Image (tube, rainbow, N blue to C red):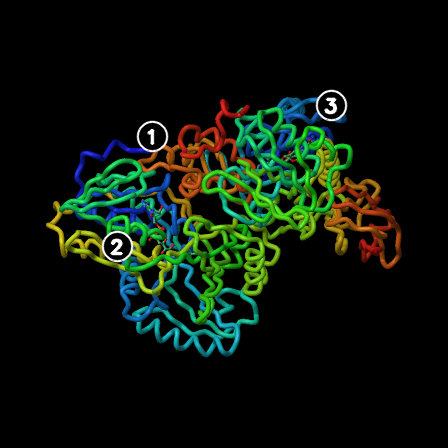
Amino acid sequence: MSLTPVSPREDLFDVAVIGAGVVGCAVVRRFALAGAKAILIEKGADILCGASKANSAILHTGFDAPPSSLELALIRAGRQEYLEIHESRNLPLVRTGALVCAWNDDEAERLESIAETGRANGIDGLTLLSGAEARRTMPALSDRLAAALEVRDEHVIDPWSAPLAYLSEAVALGARFLRQAELLAGRFDDIWHLETSAGPVSARAVVNTAGLHGDTVDERLGFAPEFRIKPRKGQFVVLDKAAARHVPRIVLPVPTEITKGIVVCPTAFGNVLIGPTAEEQEDRNRAAVDARTLQALLARGSEIVPALAGMPVTAVYAGLRPATESKAYRIFVRREKRAITLGGIRSTGLSSALGLARHALELHATFAAPLAPPQTAPPVPVPNLAETRERDWQRPDHGEIVCHCELVTRREIEAALESPVPPGDFGGLRRRTRAGMGRCQGFYCHARLAEMTKGRLATPLAVDAEDRNR
Amino acid sequence: MSGTDADVIIIGGGPSGVAAGLELRRRGVEKIVLLEREAQLGGATRHCSHSPFGMREFGRVYFGASYGRRLEEEAQKHGVDVRTGHSVVGLGMDGSVEVATHRGVEAMTARRIMVTTGAREQPRAARLLPGDRPIGILTTGTLQAYVAFHGLMPFRRPLIVGSELVSLSAVLTCLTHGARPVAVVETRPHALARAPLSWFPGLVGIPFRKGVEILDILGSSRVEAVTLRCDARSETLACDGVLLTGVFTPESALFLQSPLGVDAGSAGPAVDQDGRLANPLYFAGGNVLRAVETGGWAFREGRAVGAAIAQDLESGSPAADHVSVSYEDPVKLVVPALVRRRDIRSAALRQFQLRFLRKARGTLSLTIDGRTVWHGRGRWLPERRILVPIPDSAQDARHIGFRFAEEP
Ligand SMILES: Cc1cc2nc3c(=O)[nH]c(=O)nc-3n(C[C@H](O)[C@H](O)[C@H](O)COP(=O)(O)OP(=O)(O)OC[C@H]3O[C@@H](n4cnc5c(N)ncnc54)[C@H](O)[C@@H]3O)c2cc1C
Ligand SMILES: Cc1cc2nc3c(=O)[nH]c(=O)nc-3n(C[C@H](O)[C@H](O)[C@H](O)COP(=O)(O)OP(=O)(O)OC[C@H]3O[C@@H](n4cnc5c(N)ncnc54)[C@H](O)[C@@H]3O)c2cc1C
């Protein structure tokens, strides 16, 4: 299958969504469900090329969101919809719950007010625990723990399969996904004429979900800048699966004014994360890791959970939050131009994406003619990658196991390559299958994957034979 | 064999696993099942295309996959039940293993389990290297598999990191497959391989720098450059890949994920002089015990542990108590890390194997119950094999330890 779908040039779309992060994927699904003829435009070779590539994968409740904010409402709506649809899409929900951990009396005193905010935000399942009580729910926590606030409904999900499921559903409903198509400029003369690096696209309305480039895309659409992205980097360390038995719950710090602090958190795939940091930077494209910070994260992790000391590191990564000069989501509607900007979705977008998508559709209804009747189609399940549910290797006839560390089968890799939204780069293959994401990071399977993905990826794993002797 | 699927299940069909199987059969143990997750036997030898294997064990040399085929023939001939495409995903504590095959998941049991899962190189993440995470950063084993199994190359102008023997073999693999390394760099102040081998990059005109720090890896989709600090200067080298060589670690996932655990020093299972774990149903041999030895060593070690398992099954006596061997920095690891109250002279491992974490000068001594029974003085280099005979008196010891008196 080629990376660019059939030319969408002659078509007029009801809506063009710009940017295939988790928010764009959710938005295009919501519009497709509402009957819109929709297109998702992404500059990268695959979905999730920006902020959505690297996060903590927590489905937040909103217990610590600013009271009565739009962010809170959208987190709650997004989370609610996720809970409703995840089963039929084969998406995991790991009911870990979280402990907001206080390590001294000062912090312990602040737990009560955090709990109050949470209750005011309408969140159930908040319980103040003594250090000993909290450790009964997670014995590996350091005995220095003073007290904790249990947040029962903070859960862990698969941050890559969820947006893939949203987009796959949209595509099944007829939406288009155009990749390697950077939005360069836009002109509105009652319809939008969008110029992309993959050719022109016409649409009645646009939704800017360009995340880390939200401000730039607004400018390219001809709008005066309303906000400025100030990327905030978060580095992580991923520990070996052997660590998971010590970390059954999300361990959150008591946030201070200066930093939100370091989280220790299980993943849906059976690893443990330590991170993220919060580092302001100018560059929107580079999310580099550095050894000193990674070492500091490892040290902090083993202060919180001493059994993590010496645990092998499986992966390291960094993500950039699309932060702005304000804490709030930066949502703008230009009715006369039929344009919506969902910007500055800084640190809760995975949780709120489905809510943001509903919100965008509501905003759209304030300026657009009614869409065609809503569509119904059977939900599109995605392959499960979480350890909490049955994986392909546990079922017969999968061909063989290609990636031994993550137990990825040939059938899974072939299915991903042949799927309606196939991976466009190696990262995309890893996120869809987990191949090469385990403790050996491809020592055993990388060469095999190079062979299996020949001709399929924008940047091939193997270099061309002709070029070799240059 | 009362109610189990096998007398012995061997996990991993590299040289050590196959050698153990052959020895067990030679000593008349009936049912030996060898589980290998790949489609062929041979383990890491399958992709080592320019090393000869097999001289000591088979009296002739083999290269690459042909050695694995010889192992396969031997195993068949001696009645080892070889099952390829069988990936062990869990170890019980009671002689059971969980196996994934193309049919799904199965449980199997045996009277003894021997783990011979080998070793691999540490990937980029575990080394905490800084920078971007583009494609093109890989290890020698991966490069060898690209070349040997698929005729592919992952880069044309890699930077090679490391100066172990395997690093020099990586240079050779590059040069013979149309790639030209931009440089070989070593983060330590000295090469790990001995001269004259360490002169090799220079001889073929590739810059070799020691005492280098990797400051940054750049590249959005594929590696584009690496920034290094060398002699207090920093410099950015354009390249299209980073080849991480050496820094081996045991493939000990099965232990790590089970209560059997791993030894902090070797990162493999802690075993006694017979290759036996504290849980007496489990044995291990070959590179999973410690990274990294040659194929020939792994074969001999596997055979010796196989013999010990056969003896154990025959004797039927319960496993004796054990003591742990203590050691301290700069000793990185000691294998065996346990000694059981059992005859040393008939043991599988007759010597302690040690490795140093760093270069050090001084006296290394072995003390048993407070008495120094062995010592050696000199300059000790990291990752070099050090062998100390296990004295007979170790079998009754209460305290066994290695000490190091460092000299400036
Ligand atoms: C370290 C970290 C931890 C986090 N943890 C959590 C968590 O636990 N829970 C949670 O809910 N949220 C979390 N988040 C937040 C969440 O990841 C973000 O809110 C979310 O990913 C934002 O998604 P987005 O779609 O708005 O932006 P992005 O993911 O940045 O998507 C924008 C897309 O637009 C594309 N694009 C940009 N410019 C153009 C153009 N000109 N033309 C075409 N395409 C373009 C980009 O390539 C990109 O794919 C975390 C974030 C970080 C960084
Ligand atoms: C990159 C590299 C270069 C080398 N170069 C040389 C050299 O030049 N000369 C030399 O003498 N030696 C070399 N060696 C070392 C030599 O290959 C090893 O010493 C030898 O192969 C070790 O044998 P082994 O049986 O201990 O393990 P391995 O050969 O590693 O075999 C382990 C086997 O276990 C299997 N396995 C692992 N986990 C499981 C599981 N869960 N279930 C089922 N099966 C499993 C693996 O698939 C593999 O086949 C090199 C090794 C590497 C990695």
Which amino acid type is marked by label 3? Phe
Mark 3 element type: helix
The amino acid type found where label 2 is placed reads Thr
Binning the other alpha carbons within 10 Å of mark 2 as few (below 14), some (14 to 19) or many (20 upward) gives: many
Which subunit holds the residue at mark 2?
Answer: A
Identify which residue is drawn at 58% across, 40% down.
Answer: B237
Disc 2: residue Cβ within 8 A of ligand 1's nearest atom: no
User: Is A179 in front, or is A377?
Assistant: A179
- In the rendered image, which quarter contains the C terminus of chain B? bottom right
Q: Which mark lies nearer to you, 3 or 1?
A: 1
Q: Amino acid at mark 1?
A: Ser
Q: Within 10 Å of the Cα at label 1, are there few (<14), some (14-19), or many (20+) other Cα atoms?
A: few
Return the residue at label 3: B58
Same subunit, labels 3 and 1: the answer reads no
Viewer-proximal residue, B263 or A227?
A227
On the image, numbered disc 2 is attached to which residue? Answer: A341
- Numbered disc total: 3
A95 displayed left or right of A275: left
Q: Counting residues from the N terminus, which is met first, the one under dot 2 or under dot 1?
A: 1
Q: Nearer the viewer, mark 3 or mark 2?
A: 2
Give the CA separation, mark 3 to mark 1. 51 Å
Q: Is residue A344 left or right of residue B128?
A: left
Question: Is residue B295 shown to the viewer in this render?
Answer: no
Q: Is residue A279 visible?
A: yes
Give how far across and how far down residue A242 sits, in percent.
Answer: 55, 52
Q: Position of residue B120 (x, y in %)?
A: 62, 39
Image quarter in which the N terminus of chain B is found: top right
Per the image, the residue denoted by label 1 is: A2
Displayed-image quarter of ligand 2: top right
Residue A419 lies, with reference to residue A51, above or below; the image says above
